[in-house]
Amino acid sequence: MKFLKICIVALLIVPINSLFSQTNSNRKVTEERTRNWQYESECFESGGAGSSYLIQVTSYVGDVRLALNQAKKNAIHAVLFKGVAGNDLGCTAKEPLIKNGVYNDNFEYFEDFFYNTRQYNQFATLPSGSAESTEKLKRKMYKATYAISVNVDDLRKKLEYDKIIEPMGAALGGGSGMKPTIMIFPSDGWLMDNGFAKFVDNQGVKTLIPDYTSALLDKNLNIAISTLDKMVSERGYPTVRLAETLKSINQGSAMDIAVEGRDGGSGETLSMLDDLLNTAKADITWKVSWTVETNGIQKWVSYGIDALDSYTMKSIGVANDDGPKSMGASVGALLRQAVTDKMDGFLARHQDHFKNIAENGREIALDLRRFDSFEYYFNDDVEFKGREMELSSLIRGFVGSIAKDRNFSYNSGESKIGITQLRIEMNEEVENLFGGGDSVTEPMDAEKFAKKISRFIKKQFGYPSKVTPLGLGKARITIGEK
């Protein structure tokens, strides 16, 4: 009887050991293929939205019971190192987050991440709960396809925290680490299309008057600005919010700030946009437009971003595209997904522009005028340090002496002078009158530069000047009154 029991136990143990042996063998085959990263990946349907990618992953495994874990590993590997192919449903190809060399340089880290501690599991999920398809190819080889959702934002933050990759935008900062400040506006076209702007006749010239205050009551505009603001901030770029800047401006003076002398000199109007830029002092302005398109079942965002130098309003770069299609994503998620692929390259152009400004100076423009109370015209002769010269030549010489360089455009007439393409330093050292005499660094703009000219003219001729900022990059000096 005892012998019979031993035989039965032995018979039971042999299949179990055989099963364990087979499972370990299949696991070994599967792990081997995973370590060689033998898989295919492409967008699944619309490709996900917001912070997640939805990826169709085809893996090759020795046991279908191991397929789901391998699919998750492969999906994350694709996001990090290989990239994700696009599809014909509107999902564009995704570039890898990091270079493949990072894997080998941090081999022990990724061994833990994928195999020992299996941290990858917290960043990948299976929304459908089952495989899309499975197929036996040959002995000890199955082909399994899953739709895996990868939380890209959290995955990136994890690798940034562990110092495996640099934070977004870190490589764009240059040696100084300085980045331009960005302010996001709706484009003029979007304002017109949505009833938040109108044309008015300004002395025979049609002028667009935007109503930013009413526009900011639009829910989708706030979502769009908040979404883009967050994406820019994530990459280390400081931003200035349009809504907060509007609150700091007196609405009665924002639309029409008149410049006139105490004795009734001529006037100039400061636009709402100029006043906003002068208050916010952002380096770069984004003019953003977008529309939500639909084919009756799916929605997607078609967008355009025009980046402008806030001082010159010259274009730095343009980004525009159609985003991936989705049946249920929000406007913010659709916009984020649409812009994500181009954001880093787009900001790289901002950084190149900012680097050029740091090296060669910021470009501004100046207008000089005269009140009737000023005794000189600009083509009158004046005396300076024992030499006789035209007033316009004196002013030109002084401007050149305090500018970044003397290569600027200078057009002079009897009653006005126009200066364009004038380069000035980004910052200046000024004495800290309330800090023991130590110097402090302050940003330079057209208004501050114009006041240097105003002080020079007052010192030479005894006449004050009215300095009026026309946005950040342009100022008017009207000599004779203040």
Image: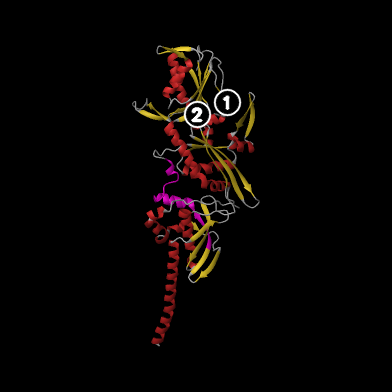
Relative to 15, does residue 202 appear above or below in the rendering?
A: above
**Residue holding disc 2:** 473
Q: Position of residue 140 (x, y in %)?
A: 48, 70
- How many neighbours does mark 1 have within 10 angstroms: few (below 14), some (14-19), or many (20 or more)? some
In the image shown, does 261 or 309 lie closer to the viewer?
Answer: 309
Residue type, mark 1 in image: Asp
Q: Residue, x 41% and y 84% (percent of image)?
A: 7
Q: Is residue 386 left or right of residue 325?
A: left
Q: Position of residue 449 (x, y in %)?
A: 45, 25
In the image shown, does 425 or 187 lie closer to the viewer?
Answer: 425
Task: Give the numbered dot on residue 256.
Answer: 1
Q: Secondary structure at mark 2?
A: loop
Q: Position of residue 198 (x, y in %)?
A: 64, 32
Cα distance in 3D space between marks 2 and 1: 19 Å
Q: Is residue 113 left or right of residue 326?
A: left
Task: Give the numbered dot on residue 184.
Answer: none
Relative to 265, does residue 443 appear above or below in the rendering?
A: below
Q: Residue 64 colored magenta?
A: no
How many dots with numbers?
Answer: 2
Q: Residue, x 53% and y 42% (percent of image)?
A: 226
Q: Position of residue 27 (x, y in %)?
A: 44, 67
Bounds of the magenta segment: 145-173
Residue type, mark 2 in image: Gly
Q: Are marks 2 and 1 in contact (CB under 8 Å)?
A: no
| Image depth: mark 2 or mark 1 in front | 2
- How many neighbours does mark 2 have within 10 angstroms: few (below 14), some (14-19), or many (20 or more)? many
Q: Secondary structure at mark 1?
A: loop
